[in-house]
Amino acid sequence: MGTSPNLWFEMKQKGKHIVQFINYQVKQKKMATGFALFSAAICVGVSPEYTSAEELAQVHHIYFDQNYVTTVHSLELYDQIIQQEIDAAKRLNPDYEFTLANQVKIVEETTLFSNLNEEAATEAIKEAANIEAVTRQIVVNDKVIANLKTDADLQAAIKAFTAKFIEDENDNLSFEGNVIFRDGTAAVEEIVTASEAVNAMREPIEKVQYYTVKEGDIFGIIANSNGLTIKELSELNGDVDPEAILSIGQKLKITKETPSVTVVVRRTIKESESIPYEVEYRENDKMDKGETKVVQEGSNGARFVTYDLVLKNGEITWKKEVSEQVTKEPVKKIVEKGTKVNPSRGTGQLIWPAGGYVSSEYGYRWGKLHKGIDLAGSGMVRAADHGVVSYAGDAGDGYGNKIIIDHNNGLRTLYAHLASIDVSVGQIVGQGQHIGVKGSTGYSTGIHLHFEVHVNGAAVNPRSYL
Ligand SMILES: [Zn+2]
């Protein structure tokens, strides 16, 4: 290994030398990237009283990566060795450019001692020299994740990786966090293709962490104990129903799969949106209560909105409306609502016209339609809804004393077998108003009320309106 650092140290101690650090740059004309390998130039420890031309010789101490390698008389020899090593590597892999990957420091010394072994020095340099291919590197958080042969390969990898996130030629593209593209070196076998580099960029920066369900665990508590909201835990585990019972041993993701490189896209978009119309209600005291009338149809408006977006790996993480242009104003819908209470018009919601249990339902009985329901027992009979009495009397049709009330809304009600009728035709009656007394007139086998409801002339099951 040539002159040992210890010997050099001893020589310095004797003070019979001149040491100076020199600027030195390895001749690497073929290098594409041009590494600057030099140390600072300073002059130290000049002792002129010991110097004389015959006695003194110049030597160069060579350091690779802060480690002493050897000492040589001639830097030309050193250059030749390095160039030979580069040429040898190039012969093996002609498609690549090579360089010395070590950080080099050369210290020049003028000394009295100069018995150097050139053969040993050559071997030491060859052994210590790390000749690597010149690359373009992708570095994430100070870690080299890919070495590519050329800048074209690097650009192809970046383009392939970002392609799916770019939609618009005006998209502003950047990378989140500490992502650097730089010159570097690597062993040939470590150099990857553009598509391998894309995979490296997609590789999660951290492995996804899982939680294993234990007895008694519930979704909310698992979320809480892992610093997540239920919503976040459920988003990480899209296939798991937070309401369902978890099974022991089941694995839940508790961290997100974040790719090594996050693509941030800033984009401005323009969207046309509809402006929904409003509905305004106006009271109208000329219209019956419960009635409505559309006096003006509504129509949606339209607007053109400009949004600023930030997308991370294709997901919108920020959206802000920056301007809008209304292209069509909405037209509100105006609805009139009647407020006039009409005492002769029914509400449509009937009340039970009498007490007593239902002794017979509406429906077929002995092959014949029973067109109403029978309410057993004696008692008062009330109007089932507001209306006008349209019949009151005995028509000899088997109903006995009957009252028919027209509710002026398509409904009529009929009350039969009455003992007495206490209203007359044309009289306006309110809902619940007393109109007669239950009896057993007409074809009847006992005191009860037979009650029918007619819709536009046809008997229907009263229970549908009660
Ligand atoms: Zn009946």
Image: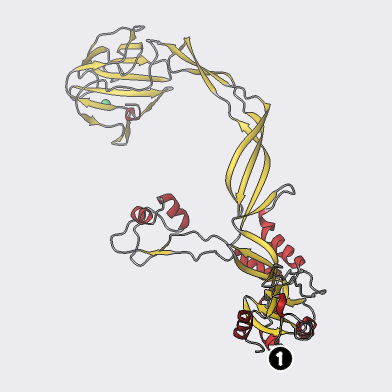
Relative to 75, does residue 323 appear above or below in the rendering? above
Residue at image position (34%, 19%) is 413
Please tell me which residue lies in front, 229 or 50: 50
Is residue 109 at least partly visible in the picture? no
Please tell me which residue lies in front, 68 or 83: 68
Q: Is residue 386 left or right of residue 313?
A: left
Snapshot quadrant of residue 368: top left
Residue at image position (60%, 80%) is 13
Q: Is residue 297 left or right of residue 270?
A: left
Q: Quadrant of the C terminus?
A: top left
Q: Position of residue 243 (x, y in %)?
A: 37, 53
Q: Quadrant of the N terminus?
A: bottom right
SS at circle 1? loop
Q: Which residue is mark 1?
A: 115
Which amino acid does the dot numbered 1 rest on?
Asn
Is residue 207 at least partly visible in the picture? yes
Q: Is residue 309 left or right of residue 243?
A: right
Please tell me which residue lies in front, 189 or 337: 189
